[in-house]
Image (cartoon, rainbow, N blue to C red):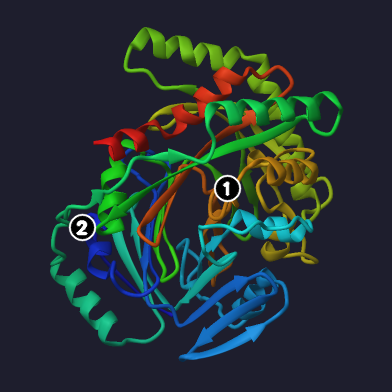
């Protein structure tokens, strides 16, 4: 693998704008200006292999040849990744897999039927990339890694040497319909009451329940991403352009990261809206910090994730390193905990992903029963929502988000979701309002 380091002189958005229309273009954005502990942005396109899965089949495209397989898609990805390794240990991504796993793939693991849906997308899709630009905001440098030089790499090298990327100029896009939800308030209330009865009967302790919004649009989704990004800034943001779906994710939540030593998950449970009024904002923070209900919800999920990690981590290595931290994002404050463990030689990151997917913070507890109830009560498949987006690098590093605060674009329609955890003492009005608090910036942008 070749590596060239350039002066830090370009907004990563301008660099990505140059390749945004290439096939399977990817932009993983840390929003370092807002989240100082986030360090890297990753940019690439034109993968050398493509892996995408539907129920009962996975297609692998390589050199314009399509091969069909019937094994588990994550196992297929693991097998393909064995052919790629890297001699560059000091970058997060040195070529490898970038893509998404939809929430619905998790349903297939638990034998839960997938409904028909108008959001037509593969259950999983990853490109295998042999080059990438990594913008390092801490060291203030830009790294280009690549296997072989071709016309695209030659052009990018010249542009990086001459600091010659054009500034991104937004084009116009239009919202062509009113925004509609797949649940009315009355329908939400009926389903909320059903969840309450499941909780009282001992089926579950918590259910993460959501509603889906949709509207028609025309224009470039890259422009929509850039319109949303300043007001929805998040540390695990992503823009992915694939032929079957464009994904715009503004996720505040990490599903799994791995640095070849420690695996980490950072579940979010507990929310209060951010207020521009200082006094109201401080009150919201105090409420969140002292809320028995929110802490109990968070602790349930922490216990669930300790169990999930424990399936593929060294015995005794799983530890809660942070409990009930408060982190502030564009429009909400969240309670965030951190759970870490070590993967033994008998396992690997792919087994760990399968053992933990989907993330417990967006299912509820106990996990499998919660997933069954979600599938029964939510009108539509979740698709990318509450799935995961990120990379598995050829040098072993991995970072995957939980795809909340995410917009999916397909067939001139935008889909996005708002949800929250329902427990025994939840109140329907406040839970319904919370789903809107989380997507408020999107609703404002799309209304305007």
* Residue located at (13% from left, 63% from top): 166
**Callout in the foreground (1, 2):** 1
Is 274 on the left or on the right of 10, as rendered? right
Q: Could you say whether the residue bearing mark 2 is in a helix, strand or loop?
A: loop
> Which residue bears the numbered disc 2?
10
* Residue located at (24% from left, 75% from top): 156
147 vs 199: above or below: below
Distance between mark 1 and mark 2 Cα atoms? 32 Å
Q: Could you say whether the residue bearing mark 1 is in a helix, strand or loop?
A: loop
424 vs 254: above or below: above
Q: How far across and how far down the image is residue 310, in percent? A: 79, 49
Q: How far across and how far down the image is residue 42, in percent? A: 38, 61
Q: Work out which quarter of the rendered image holds the C terminus and state it.
A: top left
Is 41 on the left or on the right of 53, as rendered? left
Of marks 1 and 2, which one's residue comes earlier in the chain?
A: 2
State the image quarter where residue 397 is shown: bottom right
Question: Which of the two residues, 260 or 167, is positioned nearer the viewer here?
Answer: 167
> Which residue bears the numbered disc 1?
386
């Amino acid at each position: 693998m070749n590596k060239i380091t350039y002066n830090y002189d370009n907004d990563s958005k301008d660099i990505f704008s140059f390749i945004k229309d290439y096939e399977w273009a990817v932009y993983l954005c840390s929003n370092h200006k807002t989240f100082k502990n986030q360090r890297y942005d990753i940019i690439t396109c034109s993968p050398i292999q493509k892996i995408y899965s539907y129920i009962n089949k996975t297609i692998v495209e390589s050199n314009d040849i399509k091969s069909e397989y019937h094994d588990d898609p994550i196992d297929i990805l693991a097998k393909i990744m064995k052919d790629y390794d890297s001699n560059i240990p000091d970058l997060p991504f040195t070529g490898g897999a970038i893509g998404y796993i939809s929430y619905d793939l998790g349903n297939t693991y638990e034998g839960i039927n997938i409904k028909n849906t108008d959001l037509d997308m593969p259950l999983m899709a990853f490109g295998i990339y042999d080059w990438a630009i990594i913008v390092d905001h801490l060291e203030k440098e830009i790294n280009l890694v690549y296997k072989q030089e071709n016309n695209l790499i030659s052009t990018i090298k010249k542009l990086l040497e001459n600091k010659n990327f054009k500034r991104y100029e937004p084009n116009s896009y239009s919202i062509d319909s009113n925004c509609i939800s797949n649940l009315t308030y009355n329908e939400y209330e009926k389903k909320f009451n059903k969840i309450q009865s499941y909780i009282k009967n001992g089926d579950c302790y918590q259910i993460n329940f959501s509603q889906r919004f949709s509207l028609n649009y025309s224009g470039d989704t890259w422009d929509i991403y850039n319109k949303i990004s300043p007001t929805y800034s998040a540390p695990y943001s992503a823009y992915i352009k694939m032929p079957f779906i464009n994904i715009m994710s503004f996720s505040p939540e990490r599903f799994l990261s791995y640095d070849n030593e420690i695996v980490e998950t950072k579940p979010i449970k507990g929310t209060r809206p951010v207020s521009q009024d200082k006094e109201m904002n401080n009150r919201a923070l105090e409420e969140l910090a002292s809320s028995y209900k929110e802490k109990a919800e968070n602790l349930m999920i922490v216990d669930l994730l300790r169990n999930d990690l424990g399936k593929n981590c060294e015995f005794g290595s799983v530890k809660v390193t942070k409990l009930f931290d408060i982190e502030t994002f564009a429009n909400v404050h969240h309670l965030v905990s951190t759970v870490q463990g070590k993967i033994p030689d008998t396992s690997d990151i792919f087994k760990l992903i399968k053992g933990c997917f989907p993330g417990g913070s967006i299912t509820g507890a106990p996990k499998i029963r919660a997933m069954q109830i979600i599938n029964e009560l939510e009108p539509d498949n979740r698709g990318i929502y509450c799935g995961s987006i990120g990379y598995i690098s050829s040098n072993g590093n991995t970072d995957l988000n939980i795809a909340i605060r995410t917009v999916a674009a397909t067939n001139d329609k935008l889909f996005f979701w708002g949800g929250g955890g329902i427990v025994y003492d939840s109140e329907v009005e406040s839970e319904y309002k919370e789903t809107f608090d989380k997507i408020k910036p999107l609703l404002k942008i799309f209304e305007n």
